[in-house]
Image: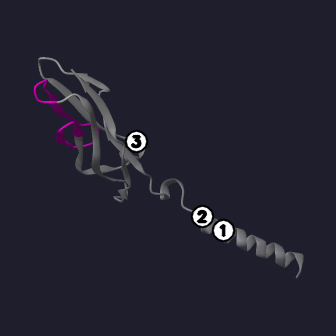
Amino acid sequence: MSAKVLCSAAAGVALLAGMVVAPTGASAAASCTAWGTLPSHVKLRSHPVTVHMTLRGSDACHTGGVDNGGTATLHGPGATDPQRWARLGSTDTQTFQVRVNRPGTYTLGHGDIQIYNRREVLVPVHWRRTSMDVTR
């Protein structure tokens, strides 16, 4: 085989290898990470304490739109409370009372949000759990 044919064959293999590489940049599906903000610590007192939880997301979450808002569940000692947000950046609240809520760790998890990019393609979403400590 001549050197010219070998060189041509090697170039063809390199071209094919470039075609099977995973897409990058704008053509790749970006993954979004979403979470609800929580204070790190809440101290229960004689009066009710209102905790504000804001729905946040990584840069990939802000490429298009949110369909039907977002949801998550606040889990704590003896309590499970659903949370709901209309869009990224909106806030939901939960009121804590010394006679009702038990001290312990409360975790915001099991989140669900549907994010679409500018081409109206569903973006994969990962929910980041957040937590706070509640004391008396």
Viewer-side residue, 74 vs 28: 74
In the picture, the quarter occupied by the N terminus is bottom right
Q: Is residue 119 above or below residue 104?
A: below
Tag 1 or tag 3, which sits nearer the N-term?
1
Chain part drawn in magenta: 75-101
Q: Is residue 134 above or below residue 84?
A: above
Within 10 angstroms of label 3, few (less than 14), some, or many (20 or more) residues?
few
Res 39 quadrant in image? top left
Query: Is residue 18 shown left or right of residue 105?
Result: right
Query: Is residue 59 shown left or right of residue 6?
Result: left
Residue drawn at x 21%, y 36% as measured from the top left = 77
Cα separation, mark 3 vs mark 1, equals 32 Å
Pointer 3 residue: 58
Cβ atoms at labels 2 and 3 below 8 Å apart: no
Query: Is residue 30 shown left or right of residue 42?
Result: right
Viewer-side residue, 46 vs 102: 102
**How far from the left and from the top, in percent, is residue 37?**
30, 33
Look at label 2 and name its amino acid.
Val
Residue most extreme to the bottom? 1
Residue drawn at x 68%, y 69% as measured from the top left = 15
**How far from the left and from the top, in percent, is residue 45?**
16, 18
Pointer 2 residue: 21
Tag 3 or tag 2, which sits nearer the N-term?
2
**Dot 3: element:** loop
Q: Which mark is residue 17?
A: 1
Look at label 3 and name its amino acid.
Ser
Cα separation, mark 2 vs mark 3, equals 26 Å
